[in-house]
Image: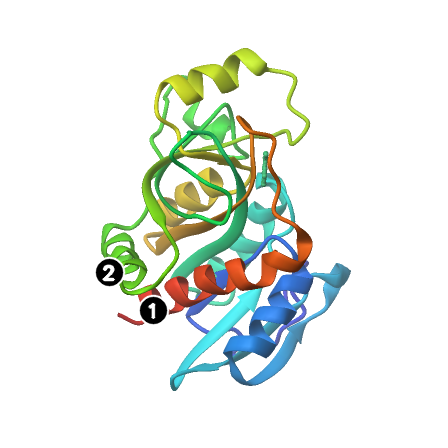
Amino acid sequence: MTVHIGAKPGDIAETVLLPGDPLRAEWAAQTFLQDAVCVNRVRGMLAYTGTWKGNRVTIHGSGMGMPSLSIYVNELIRDFGAKTLIRIGSCGGMQEKVKVRDVILAMTSSTVGTPSSSIFRELNFAPNADFGLLRAAVAAAEKGNAPFHVGGIYSSDTFYDERKDLNEQMVRHGILGVEMETAELYILAARYGVRALAVLTVSDHLLTGEALPSEDRERSFGDMVEIALEAAFA
Ligand code: HPA
């Protein structure tokens, strides 16, 4: 047990999928895993460990935003031995070619600041995905039906963003989508020498204002979970 994770030693698999929403962790475990057992309920941050095609997997909520994700990912890596961490989450589309329901594989993530910024000080560290995981995710996405994009995303600290000018610069520089967790995940993976990737579903769009109706979300999110699982065990 750690401060924020009530699991016992050995309860957490080396491969961990990280949805922001704990209820989506429950849904993904019930939908994709065999013999899923709940291994964390502290603060309602549900986690389940089971198997997928015979491989052990934990699906653990990360909460919203980099400070929350940072707590869980630090403990999952340092105290429970997680070696492959894949965020499965939603993002806002930032390019015309990126449509609601599309999947984004985040090669890099730009950010204004993360919980790790204080250690980098003046350095603009470039958080990036694990290349092997990214390559495997591309192969898995090519076999599926969901349109997908590979490129840079933006990890923001604010959902209700007042910096319209900053979003314009992101759009201008080809950033595919905005969410609130990936940059810190990639930085922690680099620090501890483990593998990380973010597989995202576009749930809303900053340019068009379109948003995915809630009944459509499950099917679209299912594509993303399958890509993440295929990539983890490729
Ligand atoms: N902004 C930030 N995070 C998000 C968004 C957004 O528009 N959509 C989904 N996660």
Query: Which residue occupies 38% across, 17% down?
Result: 172
Amino acid type of the residue tagged 1 in the rendering: Glu
The quadrant holding residue 43 is: bottom right
Q: Which is nearer the N-term, disc 1 or disc 2?
A: 2
Q: CA distance from mark 1 to mark 2?
A: 9 Å
Image quarter of residue 29: bottom right
Q: Residue 105 at what x, y percent from top left?
A: 36, 47
Instruction: Name the residue tied to disc 1.
Output: 230
Residue 11 shows in the view: no
Q: Is residue 31 above or below residue 208?
A: below
SS at circle 2: helix
Q: Quadrant of the N terminus?
A: bottom right
Q: Amino acid at mark 2?
A: Ala
Residue 115 place in picture, x, y as percent: 55, 34
Task: Please tell me whether mark 1 sits on a helix, a strand or a loop.
Answer: helix
The residue at the point 38 percent across, 34 percent down is 97
Q: Residue at x 33, y 44 (%)?
A: 149
Depth check: give the residue in front, 145 or 22. Answer: 145
- Tag of residue 139: 2
Coordinates of residue 95 in the picture (x, y in percent): 42, 29
